[in-house]
Image (cartoon, helix red, strand yellow):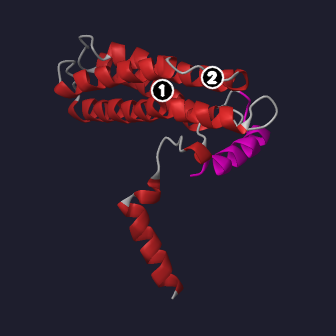
């Protein structure tokens, strides 16, 4: 779904949902304009993209680990994939913190850093020895909520024109299959 469509839905949601509802938690779009000229906007986006993309991958990887933990009713902090996620999260933090936003993009950058910190708290927690049974499920539920919030923030900070998109399905096989099915249905 494109950010413009997400924002349109979110603006409608503010009329329907309670202000504390997660559907109303999207950031205002960042676009060039007063206080943010086109060159600063492009430089900011280019500097941000490696960390933004890496954060999206970390969110996906840790979410996948949580799914595996739910299915197996166990989580082992020494799974080799956990070490990879921890390393990638540190790299994303370094990349995002290394970006100096133009003054008009400071709030946008702060929201991304907030998503990064929420993700890091989950990443750090998965390195602990975890209880089995109900204790594990309670932790997984809390981590899932934290990751969902971080994912919403990441999506809300998307800038399609600069390629800052949490997921790009336009190149996915399922999109090709859908496009083929739709075009053959038309003919």
Res. 65 image quadrant? top left
Q: What is the spatial separation of the Cα atoms under label 2 and label 1, in whole angstroms?
A: 28 Å
Q: Residue at x 54, y 40 (%)?
A: 164
- Label 1 crowd (10 A; few <14 / some 14-19 / many >=20): few
User: For this view, does 67 lie left or right of residue 117?
Assistant: left
Towards the viewer: 183 or 36: 36
For marks 2 and 1 on the same chain, the one whose residue lies earlier in the sequence: 2
Q: Main secondary structure of the magenta part?
A: helix
Q: Residue at x 50, y 17 (%)?
A: 97
Residue 5 in the magenta stretch? The answer is: yes
Residue at 75% across / 42% down in the picture?
11
Mark 1 lies on residue: 145
Residue 81 belongs to the span the image colors magenta: no
Position above or below: 155 against 150: below
Left or right: residue 120 versus residue 68 is right
- Rendered image: mark on residue 101: 2
Instruction: Depth check: give the residue in front, 84 or 11.
Output: 84
Above/below status of 89 relative to 177: above
Where's residue 179, x and y in %?
46, 71
Q: Is residue 103 above or below residue 163?
A: above
């Amino acid at each position: 779904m494109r950010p413009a469509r997400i924002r349109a839905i979110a603006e409608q949601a503010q009329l329907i949902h309670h202000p504390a509802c997660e559907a109303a938690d999207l950031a205002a779009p960042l676009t060039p304009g007063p206080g943010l000229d086109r060159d600063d906007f492009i430089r900011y986006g280019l500097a941000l993209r490696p960390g933004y993309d890496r954060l999206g991958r970390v969110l996906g990887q840790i979410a996948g680990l949580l799914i595996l933990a739910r299915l197996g009713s166990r989580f082992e902090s020494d799974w080799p994939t956990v070490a990879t996620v921890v390393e990638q999260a540190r790299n994303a933090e370094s990349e995002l913190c290394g970006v100096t936003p133009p003054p008009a993009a400071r709030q946008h950058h702060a929201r991304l850093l907030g998503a990064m910190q929420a993700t890091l708290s989950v990443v750090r927690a998965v390195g602990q020895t975890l209880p089995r049974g109900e204790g594990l499920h309670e932790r997984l539920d809390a981590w899932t909520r934290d990751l969902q919030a971080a994912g919403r923030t990441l999506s809300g900070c998307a800038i399609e024109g600069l390629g800052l998109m949490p997921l790009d399905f336009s190149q996915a096989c399922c999109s090709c299959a859908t496009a083929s099915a739709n075009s053959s249905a038309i003919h």
